[in-house]
Structure formats: structure tokens, C-alpha cells
Image (spheres, helix red, strand yellow):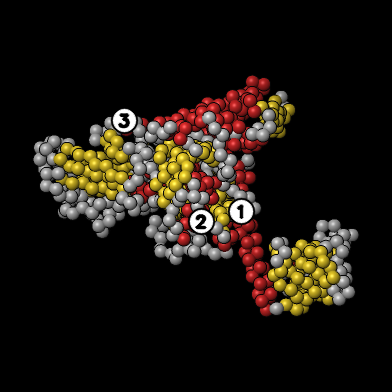
Amino acid sequence: MDYSNRRKDERVKYPLLIRLSTDSTDVKKDFAVNISKGGCFVHTHNPPEVGQTIKFEILKNTGEILFSGEGTVVWKKTESDDKKEHGCGIRFTKLSPQAARLIEEIVAQEIERSGAIKEYKEGRDIEPSKPAETPAIKKSRKIIGIDLGTTFSCVSTVVNNKPVVIPSRQGYRTVPSIVAINEKGKLLVGNPAREQLLINPRNTVYGAKRLIGRKYKSKIVQDIKSRFSYEILEGENENCIVSIADTKFTLEEISSFILKELKEIAETYFAEEVNRAVITVPAYYNESQRQAVKEAGRLAGLEVERILNEPTAAAIAFGFYKGMKKRIMVYDLGGGTFDVSIMDIHDNVFEVLSTGGDTFLGGVDFDNRIVNYIVDEFNKQYGVDLSKDMVIMQRLLFAAENAKIELSSAQEKAVHIPFVSLINGKAVDIRQSITRQKVEELTSDLVDRTIIVCEEVLNAKNIDIKSIDEILLVGGQSRMPLVKKKIVEYFGKEPHKGVHPDEAVGIGAALLADSILKNENVLLIDVLPMSVGISLDGKKYLKVIPRNSQLPTERSITLLNPADFVKEMTLGIYQGESPFIEANEIVGELTIFNIPQVPKGKARINVKFSVDPESIFKIQAVDLESGESLPVRFINFTNRKDLIKVRLEDSPGDAGPPRKSDKTDTRTEKGPKKNGFMSWLKGLFSR
């Protein structure tokens, strides 16, 4: 048979069906079809004869007819010719202009998509970070909702008033939050990066959400950095950076690669540009982390319309436009972080009453307990420590995660990993049976930590446990039977089952994004997750705005000049709950200028921290003797090289920092550009 008329290289796979008929017969059955500009391939067990004239209808897989026409069979293959690709090729002979244009669009779209998928699997060139100041671009018609997770992320939208999770390039509902560089120096994101994690963990970054916005020398980072297989270093601004394949990246850049992948998935889904997003973060994220996520969004080409707390997003998914009046608690135990928020829902008003959490408690910690147990058991049996081999540890981590998931429904799971070591010249496997009971023994204290946080959140606002109407379990790790058991024991009621643990946060973000587009009356009343305060002596910490303060709010503090005849004074700004600054996180440094030059303690300066109804944080300094406003400058210590604007209250006066405008744009002349504490609060409370 001559197959020279085949157009195989030009055909594209597309989810279409074809219905065939001839002059002598009407074939009612629908066949799968691959299409090209000039014809199509029909996959059928009984292809018509070459030369036959065929009438056809092209349908979507839903049954909707796209177009019809006529063609001629130019070749055929029976099952005896080809067991896999039997069928026939049809050359189009009669098509309407509209049908021809539609085919061209389908082919062009699929060729572009297939090229993107190839790049996705094989990696793309690493693009340099964009400069801090990017030109204004036209806002897209769509705003997407993004759940940027520790282990997996997802992108969602609203279609016909219903929230939809947009599938990834490979058809999954989530994208692994993993970035890698392969042996060719190409950038991999998502599933291709996750596949490399098993064989090249040194050049694969995972869990970036735990490190973003963190200082390298902080106790938390020093305690956990050994858990990661890639290299974590100190950046120019004291924050964490990572090094993979001899290339250094900030955590903002790593997160931007994931956000860009989600952005492109959405653009493929909509067939148009998307450059606006609502991005969720843990409720207990601090200033640095929130601004870092916003910066990652900017690097990915997204205008971040809102930074939304994850528990609030889950509550929106639960109660949006349902006319309910309930008090709920959102228990969000994800892959790497844990949050608890108690809130009241009154129709479309979502009011957070109290919030708390632990940004270093999540599913990966449960996985690590299982890994450590298997490593210890292997060491007892063979006297070999597997923890030194990063590849084996990564294989173990995958196996532990799978075992943990299966043990949510099963009582026992056999873990088998072949060829992990050579002993006396023989290959040795890991063969370890593990029960649900054993996993619960290994991780019970982790679940207890979540209950302690729940108790702290209740006590912070004296909330009666009996006043909670519903408990929402969110995050993949919340599926663990032990979690549900402890929740029932503590709260005395079953958790609600009406939200999807993996998708609720992304869906809530999409619903809020849609409400922003439609200018709908949705009110989010949030609280400050961590206290904000100052230090005068470099040792003790004085809270100015307490944790869980409802917004908008303002607080003032009166300060005295610290020495004789000084012209200015400097305050350290911190976040946290400890009375000592070393246990809190430094935010930055506030300098007040034009202080009256009088003996020590004679000048009285009122400093007011406020968050207005527009969610813009401001700082004012006033000389109480004269009533005059004093100039202020804030220098942020939080790592970003790129500009994050700081909004300060307009302050007249000749002294003080140079300013290009009344709205102060605070930067250092040398070294990295800094973020603003007030700008963070604007993002934090933009609800």
C-alpha cells in the first residue's frame, strides 16, 4: 500500500470525533481523529476503501458538531498492516471558509501547545531577573487565583459563576512546587523537576516556601537547612539564597518560576494573556515573607491584586454567596506550614477573630519521621547509615510520602526500595513493613502541636470552644486519620466535609479574584497575625500594635530624646511576641529627624503607627511641645534587591532623608534596595 499521501508530520492530536457516511452507507459510529489543514486521520478498525468519497461531521467529544464537509480516502491501514495505527487518511475536498479557518486555528494552537510541552519537559533557558522598575502593561481581562504551596501549587478561575481548578500541562490538578536545572543547564519546573529530584537532588529546589523571606543566620534556618539536599547560602542582604548547578538564585526567583508556570497554564486555558492574580500565603507569614511572595509575583509577570491568607481563602470557598451566618475554624495543615484561623461569616462578610500558626510544621515533617524510622531500622539490621546518601534519602522520602498517603485508608504498607547499598559484595534492598499505628506513634507529637496552636488561638481572644459552628480541615496532611481523631477529641464534634482539602485554598482565591473583577461587595476583615513593636535599647521589645488587632487600627507611643541635644533618633522595628528582641524578627530601622535640641528626656515625640481603611500603613512623628510633624525615614532589612515602596506620612521640614516626592520611596544608595514595612502592611491588609 502506498502511504505517500499521508500528512503525519502536519497532523495534530486534538480531542475531536468524526462521523462518516458514504453514498451507500451511513456510519453512525464516532471515531477518534487527528487533523491537519488538508485532511485528517481516522482511527478505525474497518477503514473505507481508497478512492471512496466520504461525507463527514467533525464533533467535539461532547457531541457538539463543529463543522461538516466532504473528502476522499487516500490511504488505509487495516489491523493486519498496523496493530497500533490502523485507519485511513482522508483528504478534504469540500469545506466551508469558516471550517477551513477553524482547522487552521486548531492546528496552529496545537503546534504551539506541543512546542510548549516539549520545552516544559526538556527545560527552558534560564532568563535573567527583570529590573525592579518594569514598564506599565495593560491589565488582563482575567484575574486568576493561585495557591502557592510548599509541596504542590494550583491555579484556579471562575467559569460561568463556578470555581474551576485549571489542569496542568499534563492534566494534573496541581503542579509540584519544585524547580531544577538539568544536565543541559535547562530550567525545569513542576513534574519534570520532580522526576529529576530522585536522580539529581543536589540541583533540585523544593520547599522554597519555608525559606522565602528568611534570614540565613536565623535559628530556624540553621536548624532546618541540613534537611534539604540542595545548597543554601547567605545572600548579599543576609537572607537565604540557593545554589544549584553553580548558579545562585534568590528564593523570590525560585518562587517566580513556579508562579510563571501557573501563569502560562492559565494563559493556555484562556488562550489570552493573564497578568493579574490573587496569591495565597500562610496566615502566620511575617512581613518579609509576604513581600517576598509579592516580589516573586512581579518577577513572574503578575500584578498581585491581593495577598490572601490561606485560611481566609478556604473560608471563602466554604461560605461565598451562601447567605450563611456561622463561626468557623479553619485548620490548615499543608505540606510545609500550619495555620489556624477563627472567623465569623455573615453573608459576604468574612471577619477574622483570631489567627495563629507554625510556618515549620507540615506534611514534610511527617514524612521525615517515617524516613528517619526506616533509616534507623536499616542501620540496626545492617550497620549502614543511609542518611549520608542524598539520592537514597530522596527515594526514601518519596516512598515515605506514598506510604503515609496509603496508610490514611489502609492499616499496613510495605515499603520496598531496591539496591540501596552493597554489603559483602551483594546488593541490599530496603524492605520495611510499616503500620498506621506506628506512623501515629512517630508523629503524634506533631499533631499535638497543632492542637496546642488551636488552643492558643482560642485563648488569645477568649473564644468559647462551644461557639464554633464548623471546623474545616484544609491541606493534604489534614486527611490523616489521627488528625481527625484529635480534632474530635478536643472540639467534641466532627469536622465539616464540604470542602476539598487540596483545592479549597485555590478555589477561595479564584472566587475573590472574580469578585474583584465584578466589583462585588465582599468584605474581608482581617487581623494582624504577629505583633509589631519597637526596641529602644537593642535588647527589650515593646509592642505597639498587638497580635490579632482588627483592622483598620492605629496605635501611638510617646518617646523621649535619648541623649542631650541630639537632632535625630533611631528605633528598631520588630515582629513577634517575646519581650526580648533576639526571639523576634527584625523588620527594619525607623529614623526620626529634626528633634528639638534639648537636654536628654526633655523632648517628647509622639510616634503613631496606623492602618487606614484603604489598608495603607502610615507612620507619623509629632513634636508634642510644638505640635509640628517631624520627618521620618524607614530602612527595611528584609533582603530584597528589588524595590518595594515604603509609604510614609508626609512630613515637612528641611532635615531628613532626600526624597523625590512626598510619598517617600526609600532605597539605599549602595547595596541592595530595601522593602518597606508599611508596604508589607498594605499588602497584608489589602483584603
Q: Which residue is mark 1?
A: 167
Tags 2 and 1 touching, CB below 8 Å: no
Q: Circle 2 sits in a helix, a strand or a loop, which is it?
A: strand
Q: Circle 1 sits in a helix, a strand or a loop, which is it?
A: loop
Q: Which residue is mark 2?
A: 144
Q: Is residue 254 left or right of residue 612?
A: right
- Amino acid type for the residue under numbered disc 2: Ile
Residue 356 position by quadrant: top left
Q: Is residue 530 left or right of residue 48?
A: left
Residue 661 is situated, as x and y percent measured from the top left of the image, at: 26, 59
Considering depth in this image, is 343 or 159 the residue closer to the camera? 343
| Mark 2 and mark 1: Cα distance apart in space | 13 Å
| Mark 2 and mark 3: Cα distance apart in space | 41 Å
Considering depth in this image, is 388 or 63 the residue closer to the camera? 63
Residue 184 is situated, as x and y percent measured from the top left of the image, at: 60, 51
Tags 2 and 3 touching, CB below 8 Å: no
Q: Earlier in the sequence, mark 2 or mark 3?
A: 2
Q: Is residue 343 visible?
A: yes
| Mark 1 and mark 3: Cα distance apart in space | 47 Å
Disc 1 packing (10 Å; few <14; some 14–19; many ≥20): some
Considering depth in this image, is 46 or 199 the residue closer to the camera? 46
Q: Which residue is mark 3?
A: 579
